[in-house]
């Protein structure tokens, strides 16, 4: 259906932001130790199952969903991308609590946030910022932009309906012709007020013609032959 088509710019901003947030959420635990901003183990690029399932996987989901949202020219593709990204954001927020309930042996854990003062941050503020930056804050932002993109792709506005009608009929509709300062009829049919008007190019079939304009005589001498009065008869 033509109404399912949408401009690529529809999810451009949301898609780019989702890509950036997803990349940050997936890579932050691995690069955070460079800046003393991390969860244990305090070692850059150290692999743990917690970093895989609680950071890398939801970050990849948000990144992939953001790419689909950014390049989508079809509503279904944009909605799927936004939904996948929103799932990744939700997992950032609730993933740790869910894992604790499901995995009882503690093999999958995010670790512990680093403590102690860091620059202007006190120890308590540092723990709060690390929790927001790695999990809950990042997940909430991903959820917000994913829901925003989902709403933009799922709602069909007046402009979208007009564009779909134009694609189906190949005739500009009032919504787009009005932007050019003319009606749909004016946009569909050229004006005849120029030097070559319709009345000049196409004379009316009902116009009267004079005998002088279209003579009926076929005589080479310009005179109409006398009417036929029948065969000549001699004197009786």
Image (cartoon, grey):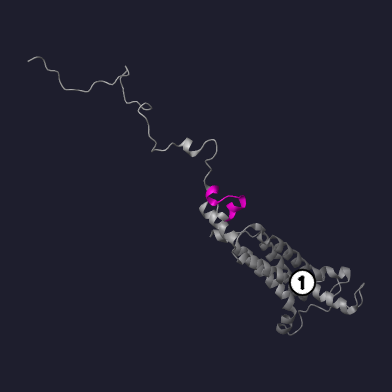
**Range drawn in magenta:** 175-187
* Image location of residue 45, percent across then percent down: 82, 69
Q: Is residue 40 visible?
A: no
Q: Is residue 183 located in the magenta-colored stretch of the structure? A: yes
Height in image: 176 above or below 205? below
Q: Quadrant of residue 77?
A: bottom right
234 with respect to 52 (left or right)? left
Where is residue 213 drawn, in percent x and y? 38, 27
The outermost residue toward the left is 236
Is 162 placed above or below 227 here?
below
On screen, residue 1 above or below 177: below
- Depth check, front residue: 2 or 67: 2
Horizontal and vertical percent position of residue 203: 43, 36
Q: Which residue is mark 1?
A: 138
Task: Indicate left or right for 131 with 14 as reference.
Answer: right
- Residue appearing at x 83%, y 68% in the figure: 31
Q: Secondary structure at mark 1?
A: helix
Q: Is residue 138 left or right of residue 224?
A: right
Q: Is residue 88 visible?
A: yes
Magenta part, dominant SS: helix
Q: Quadrant of the C terminus?
A: top left
Q: Answer whether residue 121 is magenta in the image.
A: no
Residue 97: give x, y in percent of width and height: 74, 81
Q: Residue at x 87, y 77 (%)?
A: 125
Badge 1: few (under 14), some or many (20 or more) residues near its Cα, within 10 Å? many
């Amino acid at each position: 259906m033509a109404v399912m088509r949408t401009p690529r710019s529809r999810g451009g901003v949301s898609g780019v932001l989702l890509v950036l947030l997803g990349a940050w959420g997936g890579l932050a635990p691995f690069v955070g130790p460079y800046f003393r901003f991390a969860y244990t183990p305090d070692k850059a690029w150290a692999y743990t199952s917690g970093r895989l399932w609680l950071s890398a996987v939801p970050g990849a989901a948000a990144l992939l969903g953001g790419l689909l949202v950014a390049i989508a020219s079809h509503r279904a593709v944009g909605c799927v991308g936004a939904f996948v990204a929103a799932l990744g954001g939700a997992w950032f927020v609730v993933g740790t609590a869910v894992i604790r309930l499901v995995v009882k042996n503690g093999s999958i854990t995010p670790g512990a946030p680093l403590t102690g003062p860091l620059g202007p941050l006190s120890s308590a503020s540092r723990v709060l910022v690390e929790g927001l930056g790695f999990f809950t804050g990042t997940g909430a932002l991903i959820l917000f932009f994913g829901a925003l993109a989902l709403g933009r792709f799922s709602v069909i506005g007046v402009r979208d309906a007009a564009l779909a009608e134009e694609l189906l009929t190949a005739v500009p509709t009032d919504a787009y012709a009005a932007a050019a300062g003319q009606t749909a009829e004016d946009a569909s049919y050229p004006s005849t007020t120029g030097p070559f008007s319709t009345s000049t190019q196409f004379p009316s079939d009902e116009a009267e013609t004079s005998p002088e304009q279209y003579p009926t005589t076929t005589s080479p001498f310009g005179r109409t032959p006398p009417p036929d009065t029948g065969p000549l008869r001699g004197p009786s």
